[in-house]
Image (cartoon, rainbow, N blue to C red):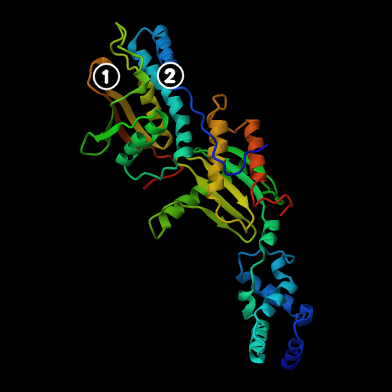
Amino acid sequence: MRKLKRTQIQQGPNFRPAVLCAPQLAPVSARQEPHAPHLSSSPMHPFHTRSTLCSASLAQMTSPAQDTVLSAASSFWSGESYTRMPRPSATDWLKQMTVHNLYLFDRNGVCLHYSEWHRKKQAGIPKEEEYKLMYGMLFSIRSFVSKMSPLDMKDGFLAFQTSRYKLHYYETPTGIKVVMNTDLGVGPIRDVLHHIYSALYVELVVKNPLCPLGQTVQSELFRSRLDSYVRSLPFFSARAG
Amino acid sequence: MSRPAHRRPEYRKINKDLFVLTYGALVAQLCKDYEKDEDVNKYLDTMGYGIGTRLVEDFLARSCVRRCHSYSEIADIIAQVAFKMYLGITPSVTCNNASRNEFSLILDKNPLVEFVEELPTGRSSLCYCNLLCGIIRGALEMVHLAADVTFLQDRLKGDSVTEIGITFLKKLDEKKYRRKK
């Protein structure tokens, strides 16, 4: 096996990556998956394609020395170089990132607004129950975080993520809570949520004397401005993520 | 079309005279509607409360102040940030009692009374700027702080300065919601 690899590599730069990728590669990547919680579980994720993996390992082989090549190749087969693979390019991530939905709660737990963009699976319960569930969970997490924090709390609860989505949270001192579910690749978006609060909710709802506070926002202007703002975000992809 | 993502909305300023004269017309109309000074004061306070509950959201959106840890910090922020932002003045803050929950804002210049020479005869106990008290009270209540806000001294009534007293009563515990400490 080792001899075969040496021969292949010595053939020069015009190797075909597919040659080095044996069918064993697929189970290796599947085994590694639980240890990489931040990756999408979709098998078609560009990170898991064979050509990416192979070109990654081959990119490390800068020295023509045989032992360097051999050690790189052997570590590649043992799976260690999995951690040294290059990150997917920015365009790969951008194609995947999207915003799933957005909730807006007030200080009494009333859901002021809800919109969704890409939601493939519903909760299976009526919307009212879903809002109560979401609010109750957020309240519990907030109090848990403040109690169990080992250091002095600065901002409190910011986000949580699962293997499929990330939930971002922003709360004002008046109790207005902005909750956005996005794809995993999205980083901290506190400023986005603050913009939704300040430039959309405050400007269009709070400052409108005809919009009563404490109930669902009926303003169509708010709905459409919020929708166009979210669609204009850099991490929003129109293709269902 | 939507606004560009991170552009700050432009805050349109209005003419100060227009604002001051409108306020004066409001108080004058209330005086016509209600005979007793206490009623006018009460109504001004109620109107201010409604304004304060909404104004606090705008204040938080624009000023990005951090969460306060003491009443004196809150009084400082009201005086130095909020008053500056909305009225263009910076009252000075003093603490009135040892238990640190009574504060005074001393206004040496009050833009709302710019065109008022003196209170009309028969209206000697009218708190002309009682709207401000209501605003502060409404705003504090929205951030879960019950407070009592009144005018302690008023230049229009003959005192040397205008002084607003804020007494913090208690932190409003939202039952079943956030529980502080």
Chain containing mark 2: B
> How busy is the neighbourhood of tag 1: few (under 14 within 10 Å), some, or many (20 plus)?
some
Give the quarter of the image for residue B150: top left
Q: Is residue A117 left or right of residue A212?
A: right
Nearer the observer: mark 2 or 1; the answer is: 2
Q: Is residue A66 above or below residue A82?
A: below
Is residue A23 in view? yes
- In the image, what residue occupies the spot 64% across and 48% down? A233
Q: Is residue A205 above or below residue A8?
A: above
Secondary structure found at label 1: helix
Q: Is residue A7 left or right of residue B134?
A: right
Secondary structure found at label 2: helix
In the picture, the disc for residue B126 is none
In this view, the residue in front, B48 or B5, is B5
> How busy is the neighbourhood of tag 2: few (under 14 within 10 Å), some, or many (20 plus)?
few
Residue A204 is situated, as x and y percent measured from the top left of the image, at 57, 32
Give the distance between the C-alpha atoms of the residues marked 2 and 1, in whole angstroms. Answer: 20 Å
Question: How many numbered marks are there?
Answer: 2
The residue to which callout 1 is attached is B155
**Contact check, label 2 and label 1, Cβ < 8 Å:** no
Chain containing mark 1: B
Is residue A110 in view? no
At label 1, the amino acid type is Arg
Q: Is residue A217 above or below residue A97?
A: above
- In the image, what residue occupies the spot 33% across and 23% down? B110
Q: Is residue A16 above or below residue A169?
A: below
The residue to which callout 2 is attached is B17
Residue B44 is situated, as x and y percent measured from the top left of the image, at 39, 18
